[in-house]
Image (tube, rainbow, N blue to C red):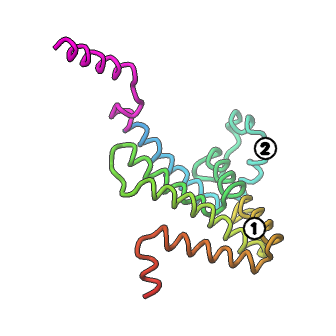
Amino acid sequence: MITRINQKKSTKSSSWHKPHILQDPRTRVIMGLILILLSVYLLLSFVGFFFTGGIDQSLVDKNSMELITNSEIEAGNPAGKVGAILSDIFINQWFGISSFIFCYLFFIGGLQVMGRSIYRFSRKLLIGFILIIWCSLFFGYLFNFIPTGYVFPGGTHGYFISNWLNSLVGKVGTLFLLLISFSVILFFGFENAFNKCVA
C-alpha cells in the first residue's frame, strides 16, 4: 500500500518536472495559428513577387537595417518589405517556384499542431520536401536556356545543381535522371499511381 502511494507521488512529481510545450492546448492553438498565418503571408509575398519583383529588386540589394529603420522606403509587394525580402530569398536564392510548396507544408503543419489529425502527415512532409528539391532542379534545367529576367524559376539551388549535372552526365543524361526520379516519386509517393499508369 505504501509502495503504491509512493509510486503515485513519484509519477506525479516526475510529470510536473517534465512539462512539454505542446501539452497545453492553448500553446498548440497559438503555434498552429502562427504556422497557418505564416503560410498565408508567404503565399501573398510569393504571388506579389511575380508582379512587383522587378520594382523591389533595388530594395533587396540595400542594407537590411536601412530597410527596417527607414519608413519612407516602401515596397510594391503586398506583404511589404519583409515579404519582398522573403520572396527573393525563397524564390531566387533558394528553390524557385517550388517554394510555393512551403506554404502548403506550413499550413498542414499548423493544423497538425492545433490538434487536427492530418492523414499521413509525416509522409506528406517527406514528399513535400522531395518535390521542392525535384521541382527546383527541373525548373533550373528547363529554364537554363531561357532568359527569365529577375525571376529564377529554379532558384540558385536548381541552377547550380542542373549545371553540375549537365557537366557530369550531359543534358540528355540530366533529362533521363529527372524522368527516372520523377517516376520514383510518382510510383512510391502517391497511392495507386503505378496501377493507373500501367492500366
Asked whether, in this view, residue 31 is left or right of residue 42, the answer is left
Q: How many marks do you count on the picture?
A: 2
> Where is mark 2, residue-wise?
62
Q: Within the image, what quadrant is residue 149 found in?
A: bottom right
Q: Within the image, what quadrant is residue 52 found in?
A: bottom right
- Membership of 94 in magenta stretch: no
Q: Residues within 10 Å of mark 1 (few under 14, many from 20)?
A: many
Along the viewing direction, whichever of 18 and 24 lies nearer the viewer:
18
> Where is mark 1, residue-wise?
162
Spatial distance from mark 1 to mark 2, Cα to Cα?
A: 29 Å
* Label 1 secondary element: helix
At a point 38% along the width and 48% down the height, the residue shown is 111
Q: Are marks 1 and 2 in contact (CB under 8 Å)?
A: no
Image quarter hosting the C terminus: bottom left
- Membership of 21 in magenta stretch: yes
- The residue segment tinted magenta is 1-28
Amino acid type at circle 2 is Lys
Q: Tell me residue 22's x, y (percent).
A: 39, 34
